[in-house]
């Protein structure tokens, strides 16, 4: 599949939200059970490294960074989210989005990216490892999804150019 990566705009939200809802429905991508409004999503994410993959004018995946803390000492630490539409998975879109998010994060002073992934989401774990993330911990029964306690694998990627 031929695609390119662009900056996400508010006009992209409906397509981004649709892909987010697919991830939510899978039960393997997030603890969230509904997609927020654009305003709520916008408020919770950094203004940079908001990326979309486009193929034939349609968004096929997206990436974004969230601050992990409001404390100044953690200003260079962000959590990364990558979502690829169900029909477009397995075609390298996630990898290209993650690499682009890494590059843009470093341009904005981010020295550490982290992820929290369900242990069963082997595709996401492989993707992260292939882009330099390492698994640093297993958080047992960290939160509930639909009334079921779930574990996550905590990953991180330390920049080699920032910090």
Image (spheres, rainbow, N blue to C red):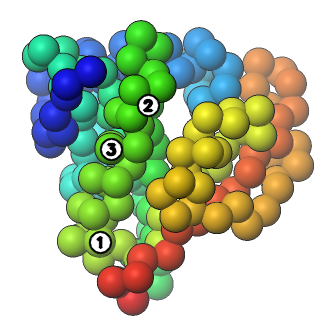
Foreground disc of the pair 2, 3: 3
Asked whether, in this view, residue 25 is left or right of residue 44, the answer is: right
Which of 16 and 54 lies nearest the eye of the viewer? 54
Marks 2/3: CA–CA distance: 12 Å
Residue assigned mark 2? 83
Q: Residues within 10 Å of mark 1 (few under 14, many from 20)?
A: some
Q: Are marks 1 and 2 in contact (CB under 8 Å)?
A: no
Locate the N terminus and report the quarter of the image it occupies. Answer: top left
The image quarter containing residue 32 is: top right
- Label 1: which secondary element: helix
Q: Are marks 1 and 3 in contact (CB under 8 Å)?
A: no
Which of 117 and 89 lies nearest the eye of the viewer? 89
- The location of residue 84, given as percent across then percent down, is 41, 26
First in sequence: mark 1 vs mark 2? 2
Residue assigned mark 3? 96
First in sequence: mark 2 vs mark 3? 2
Locate the C terminus and report the quarter of the image it occupies. Answer: bottom left
Residue sitting at x 40%, y 26%: 91
Residue sitting at x 82%, y 55%: 138
- The location of residue 111, given as percent across then percent down, is 41, 77
- The location of residue 132, given as percent across then percent down, is 52, 64
Q: Residues within 10 Å of mark 3 (few under 14, many from 20)?
A: some
Marks 1/2: CA–CA distance: 20 Å
Residue assigned mark 1? 106
Marks 1/3: CA–CA distance: 16 Å
């Amino acid at each position: 599949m031929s695609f390119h990566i662009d900056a996400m705009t508010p006009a992209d939200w409906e397509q981004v939200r649709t892909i987010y809802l697919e991830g939510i429905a899978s039960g393997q991508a997030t603890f969230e059970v509904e997609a927020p409004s654009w305003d709520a999503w916008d408020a919770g994410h950094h203004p940079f490294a908001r990326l979309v993959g486009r193929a034939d004018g349609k968004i096929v995946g997206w990436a974004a960074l969230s601050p992990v803390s409001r404390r100044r000492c953690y200003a260079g630490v962000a959590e990364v989210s990558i979502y690829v539409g169900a029909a477009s998975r397995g075609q390298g879109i996630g990898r290209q989005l993650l690499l682009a998010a890494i590059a843009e994060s470093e341009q904005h002073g981010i020295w550490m990216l982290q992820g929290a992934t369900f242990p069963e989401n082997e595709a996401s774990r492989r993707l992260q490892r292939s882009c330099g993330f390492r698994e640093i911990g297993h958080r047992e029964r960290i939160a509930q999804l639909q009334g079921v306690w779930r574990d996550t694998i905590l990953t991180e990627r330390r920049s080699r150019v920032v910090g």
